[in-house]
Image (cartoon, grey):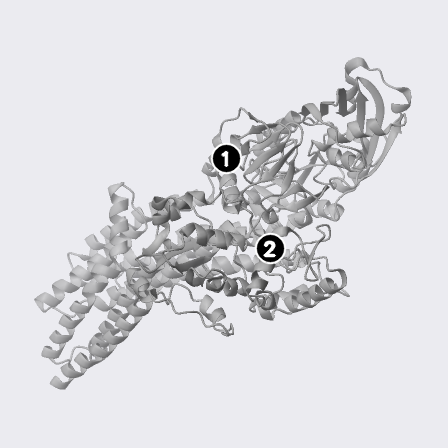
């Protein structure tokens, strides 16, 4: 699904209505119904969308059974399903498929190794084996249906069961079938399982929640019965038959044993683990509270002094566990969406049947030929087919010296190619989680910066220590006079003042902000970026490729008329570069042949020098191409016209003239600037000439800071000088010739259009279509920080008030036990829903932009 | 009043039965996935899947 256009009807914002429906199950959302209807119409009229996966299929020319397909893979899956009478797949959901893999039998060879296959198996005997695999690509009810019908595709499969929320499938198969067969069957259908080292190590993550459920069940059972046994004590107020009271107490004690030794064991284990590393973690006061209550109750009951506080203790444990389950569920869903379902808006140029077109990396198929330009990141493991690669693996290995690769050699994903464009054949599909991981690891040191996250960690640490101190003081005050109140007060203090709420607010607020941003086209590297975004006061824009469209510009040549061969030379040179002006040139020259490029050097911010078919070609800025000779051609020296950038061309050292590239600004740039101008200092840094100063001045306000002819190092220096003045800088660039400045700025956002502008040094990637929503993104992040502060304040006040009551001994342990987990749950709920509400403004422009 | 002791014994037995039922349900994975079954039940079953003869044993193993 793409991004829905804003639905505005005579000034009435329909998006609001549709947002209400977004709470409905997918099948019943009106937009989906409309979209399905329009899909039907589209398919009927043009037959131009892949019947299997819904991608455009105009150029593929693959028609089978009167249905269009985008690639041979999709057609093959269709044929397989048709053969096996499984076409209901297509009726449950429209175009449910994902383009499958042609792995050529190499990728999963390692699964033939009995040791590795054995690690994956959940169970094995002489009649049946079963394996659980993670399949992140399942996304709709059709997927569930097909995946559960695997036995019909391969008789060796006995049964397959899907867990949709965890995106796992458990397959039971006969011993005659191998794990590799099962994995390859899934991959051939477009559901390649993700086999990671963790899954090979047999990590039973899928059962993590089970033990929590057991503990909750046991605690709930015991709590309920202990409460029943305590009612006489509550209601009759001491006039209960002594023998019965004694029986009830002993029964309660028996019931409390599993709660203490089983259900609450996790808190003790975690406290000990913390203490042994000399850290007082959040579980310490809780564990102490539970221990006090239990010890005191045991003492009371055994000495016959009273019924103890077992009801409070088991209640506390039960509520704590329920709170934890809730937390884990929310956290899991945040995490999963981040890892698997929010694809970056990355794309590569793919050559199919002679024509080149850009394709999102998520739909790259094995066997696709991709063109990687200078500076492009290799999105998937591939084999170099044409050209010599000079690949810089610094994101992956930290080693910055580029390695040379010749045609025919294997290239791992994650490297950045330098030099003339090369052609590669994809051998393994893109792993979104791998790219995310690369991005996260690319620049670890940034995350160490102090912020609210670390503040909350520190506060939590000192707070815990303070609470323990207060509890000790309370005990000292009460103990000499009134030991019963002393226990009440101390346990009350320990439980009510637990700073859980403090520790939870930051991850949950920023986590949901990241999720919301991802839905609207801004992909943040991690939760810490939200906080830095909120502190921004200066925004620096790059011009070309950021404010303007890449390619598709009006272009004319000024100078002597070029021959076809000269155009071919220029086109072949420009083809290797990812710069937006190069792309415009390339489009202009696209009808000519592609000539071999032998030497290629791109000077960021200046131009390209290349040897093409024996001719030295230079294209770029005037200084770069004509050098210091100052041999300025008279007719070229005429004053610069507005609204255009100039690309000078020299062949064999002779300046031929220049291309005048008319800039087309992205839609909404003027309003974007006007909105931002009101609350931020705006700066523009451009590598181009001053041609458009006048035009831009109107956008940047009365005292515009427009800097032209900036080299990449000048951009970096400028950002540094802004920071020295105390500004917090947000830099928006295309990531091609401003990488260093992006990295230096407090938040670097790279704008992704249709190139693989994956810049691991940036903190965020924004879909070009969402750039105009920048003011809204900024305000949501500011609001998120405010939400965190507010919840800090609320939980602080709550703790102080609670403490005051608890110290006086007025707070019964049972009341404290209910209040404490309640506060954690409230914080998690408030933080996540508040962010959703704060993000409502985002929806104004782009409601319904769901990316699945 | 000693009848109360007997009643309590019975109530414990009943409640314990529910506890066991809950633990059994968790053990058999009924809490692992609370979404897929709701979709699965809507599929037509013109094609009854052959029952996995070892599924019980797999559950035990897990």
Mark 1 element type:
loop
Viewer-side residue, A796 vs A715? A715
State whether residue A852 appears in this view: no
Q: Earlier in the sequence, mark 2 or mark 1?
A: 2
A811 is higher (above) or lower (below) than A384:
below
Report whether A95 appears left or right of A674. left
The answer to whether the residues at label 2 and label 1 have Cβ atoms under 8 Å apart is no
Q: Position of residue A11 (x, y in %)?
A: 75, 64
Q: Which residue is mark 1?
A: A443
Q: How many marks?
A: 2
Mark 2 element type:
helix
Report whether B36 appears left or right of A673. left
Q: Position of residue A354 (x, y in %)?
A: 72, 41
What residue lies at 55% left-to-right and 59% top-to-bottom? A836
Q: What is the chain letter for disc 1?
A: A
Quadrant in which residue B25 is drawn? bottom left
Q: Position of residue A795 (x, y in %)?
A: 41, 56
A7 is higher (above) or lower (below) than A414:
below
Report whether A733 appears left or right of A487. right
Quadrant that contains the N terminus of chain A = bottom right
Q: Position of residue A590 (x, y in %)?
A: 78, 37
């Amino acid at each position: 699904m793409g991004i829905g256009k804003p639905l505005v009807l005579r000034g009435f914002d329909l998006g609001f209505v549709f947002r209400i429906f977004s709470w409905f199950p997918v099948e019943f959302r009106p937009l989906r119904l409309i979209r399905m209807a329009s899909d039907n119409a589209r398919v009927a009229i043009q037959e131009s969308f892949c019947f299997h996966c819904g991608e455009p299929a105009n150029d593929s020319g693959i028609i089978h059974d009167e249905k269009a397909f985008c690639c041979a893979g999709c057609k093959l899956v269709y044929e397989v399903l048709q053969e096996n009478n499984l076409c209901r797949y297509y009726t449950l959901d429209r175009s449910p498929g994902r383009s499958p893999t042609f792995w050529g039998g190499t990728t999963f060879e390692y699964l033939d190794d009995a040791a590795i296959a054995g690690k994956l198996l959940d169970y094995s005997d002489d009649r049946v084996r079963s394996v659980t695999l993670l399949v992140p690509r399942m996304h709709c009810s059709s997927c569930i249906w097909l995946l559960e019908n695997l036995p019909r595709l391969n008789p060796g499969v006995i049964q397959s069961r899907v867990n949709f929320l965890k995106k796992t499938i458990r397959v039971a198969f006969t011993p005659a079938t191998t794990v590799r067969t099962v994995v390859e069957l899934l991959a051939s259908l477009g559901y390649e399982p993700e086999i990671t080292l963790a899954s090979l190590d047999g990590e039973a993550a899928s059962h993590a929640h089970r033990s929590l459920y057991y503990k909750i069940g046991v605690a709930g059972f015991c709590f309920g019965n202990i409460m029943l046994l305590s009612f006489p004590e509550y209601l009759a107020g001491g006039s209960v038959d002594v023998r019965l009271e004694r029986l009830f107490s002993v029964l309660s004690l028996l019931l409390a044993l599993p709660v203490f030794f089983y259900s609450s064991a996790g808190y003790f284990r975690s406290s000990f683990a913390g203490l042994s590393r000399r850290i007082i973690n959040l579980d310490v006061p809780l564990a102490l509270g539970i221990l006090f209550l239990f010890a005191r109750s045991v003492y009371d009951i055994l000495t016959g002094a009273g019924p103890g506080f077992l009801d409070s203790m088991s209640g506390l444990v039960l509520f704590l566990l329920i709170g934890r389950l809730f937390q884990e569920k929310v956290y899991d869903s945040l995490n999963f969406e981040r890892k698997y379902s929010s694809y970056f808006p990355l794309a590569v140029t793919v050559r199919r049947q002679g024509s080149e077109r850009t394709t999102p990396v998520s739909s790259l198929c094995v066997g696709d030929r991709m063109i990687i330009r200078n500076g492009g990141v290799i999105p998937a493991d591939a084999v170099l087919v044409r050209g010599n690669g000079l690949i810089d693996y610094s994101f992956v290995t930290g080693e910055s010296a580029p390695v040379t690769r010749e045609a025919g050699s294997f290239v791992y994903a994650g490297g950045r190619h330098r030099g003339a464009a090369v052609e590669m054949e994809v051998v393994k599909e893109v792993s979104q989680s791998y790219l995310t991981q690369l991005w996260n690891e690319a620049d670890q040191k940034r995350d160490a910066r102090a912020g609210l996250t670390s503040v909350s960690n520190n506060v939590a640490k000192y707070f815990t220590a303070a609470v323990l101190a207060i509890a000790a003081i309370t005990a000292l005050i009460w103990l000499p006079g009134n030991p019963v109140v002393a226990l009440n007060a101390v346990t009350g203090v320990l439980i009510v003042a637990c700073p859980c709420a403090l520790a939870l607010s930051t991850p949950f607020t920023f986590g949901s902000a990241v999720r919301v941003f991802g839905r609207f086209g801004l992909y943040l590297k991690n939760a810490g970026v939200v906080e830095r975004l909120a502190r921004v006061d200066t925004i620096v824009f790059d011009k070309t490729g950021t404010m303007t469209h890449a390619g598709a510009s009006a272009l004319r040549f000024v100078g002597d008329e070029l021959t076809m061969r000269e155009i071919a030379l220029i086109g072949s040179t420009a083809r290797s570069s990812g710069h937006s002006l190069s792309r415009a040139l390339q489009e202009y020259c696209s009808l000519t042949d592609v000539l071999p490029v032998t030497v290629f050097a791109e000077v960021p911010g200046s131009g390209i020098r290349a040897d093409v078919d024996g001719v030295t070609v230079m294209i770029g800025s005037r200084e770069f191409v004509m050098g210091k000779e100052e041999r300025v051609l008279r007719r070229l020296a005429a004053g610069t016209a507005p609204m255009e950038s100039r690309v000078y061309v020299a062949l064999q050292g002779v300046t031929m003239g220049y291309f005048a590239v008319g800039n087309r600004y992205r839609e909404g740039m003027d309003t974007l600037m006007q909105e931002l101008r009101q609350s931020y200092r705006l700066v523009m840094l451009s590598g181009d000439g001053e041609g458009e100063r006048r035009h831009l001045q109107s956008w940047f306000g009365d005292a515009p800071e427009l800097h032209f002819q900036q080299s990449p190092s000048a951009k970096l220096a400028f950002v540094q000088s802004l920071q020295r003045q105390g500004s917090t800088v947000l830099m928006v660039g295309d990531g091609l010739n401003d990488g260093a400045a992006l990295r230096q700025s407090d938040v670097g956002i790279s704008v992704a259009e249709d190139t693989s502008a994956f810049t691991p040094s940036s903190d965020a990637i924004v879909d070009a279509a969402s750039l105009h929503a920048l003011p809204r993104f900024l305000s949501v992040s500011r609001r998120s920080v405010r939400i965190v502060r507010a919840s800090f304040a609320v939980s602080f006040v709550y703790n102080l008030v609670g403490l005051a009551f608890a110290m006086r001994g007025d707070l019964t342990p049972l009341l404290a036990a209910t209040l404490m987990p309640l506060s954690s749950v409230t914080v998690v709920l408030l933080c996540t829903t508040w962010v959703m509400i704060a993000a409502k403004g985002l929806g104004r422009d782009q409601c319904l932009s769901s990316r699945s | 009043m000693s009848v109360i002791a007997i009643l309590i014994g019975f109530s414990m037995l009943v409640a314990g039965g529910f506890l066991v039922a809950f633990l059994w349900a968790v053990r058999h994975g009924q809490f692992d996935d609370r979404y897929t079954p709701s979709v699965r039940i809507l599929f037509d079953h013109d094609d009854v899947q052959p029952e996995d003869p070892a599924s019980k044993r797999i559950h035990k193993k897990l």
